[in-house]
Image (cartoon, rainbow, N blue to C red):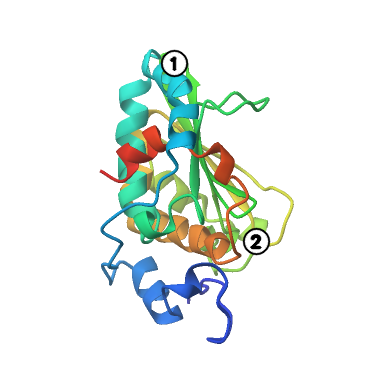
Amino acid sequence: MAPEVSTSPRRSTTGLRRFLDPGQQRDWIEGKADLRDADERSESLELRFKYVPRFQKLLRRPQAQEVLEILGFYGRNCIPIPRKSERQYWSVSCLPSTSDKPLVRVNASWMELFTLYADGEGIRARFLVHLSDFTTDHSPLQDHLDEALLEHCVTAPEDIGYFVPKGADMFGVKVRGSASIRRFLADRRALSAIRRFNLTHMNRGRNAYQASHCYSLADHMLA
């Protein structure tokens, strides 16, 4: 039986528990619910204008169109109530100034969720998920990893790799190439794992990366 998303008793009001009860969260993870989102977005014009130069710089990259299309799919399918939770519970950064030189990165709480990098003229992705979603018995044990499952989630086995970060039940998945990234995002079990991990961290409280939120990128995620 798959592990459940980390939730607290109903009395807790941290994170997305303010808007979604545990049953709604489980149904969304399993693809059984379409959650009602806000009609309007809350926006900081100062922050929007701050990152316009970085966004324009990204648009000049050969990977720009692929990045925006994949971000659009990610925003629609991997983040619950994305308009209502924008910036306060998740954010997206454009060309963040970190040593690994990503193109874009999605964060929640203090955690990286999803990152896209340049890979020559193409792209590669890094997903953080729970290890227990990719083991044969849903245990958080690396030697129980279901490598066949991972390879099934991409177009070619050589397109996928992984690493195990420090932390309980943590797992990093590296996917190379637009076609395999799209397939990974569309795979039912991989998508469920992404949703579960994202909710775990969105439930932990306010997003620590609000000041780096790029509204221009978010426009494509929320279109």
Comparing marks 1 and 2, which lies closer to the viewer?
1
Three-letter residue code for mark 1: Lys
Q: Position of residue 102 (x, y in %)?
A: 55, 27
**Front-most of residues 206 and 201:** 206
In the picture as drawn, the residue positioned furthest to the right comes out as: 166
The residue type indicated by label 2 comes to Asp
Could you tell whether 223 is left or right of 51 in the image? Answer: left
At a point 29% along the width and 34% down the height, the residue shown is 69
Residue underneath mark 1 = 57
Is residue 116 at least partly visible in the picture? Answer: no
- Give the structural element (helix, strand or loop) at label 1: helix
Disc 2 target residue: 169
Residue at x 55% of width, y 64% of height: 200
Within 10 Å of disc 1 (Cα), the crowding (few <14, some 14-19, many 20+) is few
Image point (50%, 57%), residue name? 198
Whether residue 192 is visible, yes or no, is yes
Q: Residue 202 carries which label?
A: none
Q: 211 left or right of 175?
A: right
3D distance between C-alphas at marks 1 and 2: 36 Å
In the rendered view, tell whether residue 31 sits above or below residue 24: above
Residue 13 shown left or right of residue 77 in the figure: right
Q: Residues at badges 1 and 2 in contact (C-beta under 8 Å)?
A: no
- In this rendered view, identify the residue nearer to me: 125 or 39: 39
Q: Quick check: 174 above or below 148?
A: above
Q: Quadrant of the C terminus?
A: top left
Please provide percent x and percent y for residue 143: 66, 57
Front residue of 198/40: it is 40
In the foreground, 17 or 7: 17
| Vertical placement of residue 170 versus 65, above or below | below
Please report whichever mark, 1 or 2, sits nearer to the chain's N-terminal start. 1
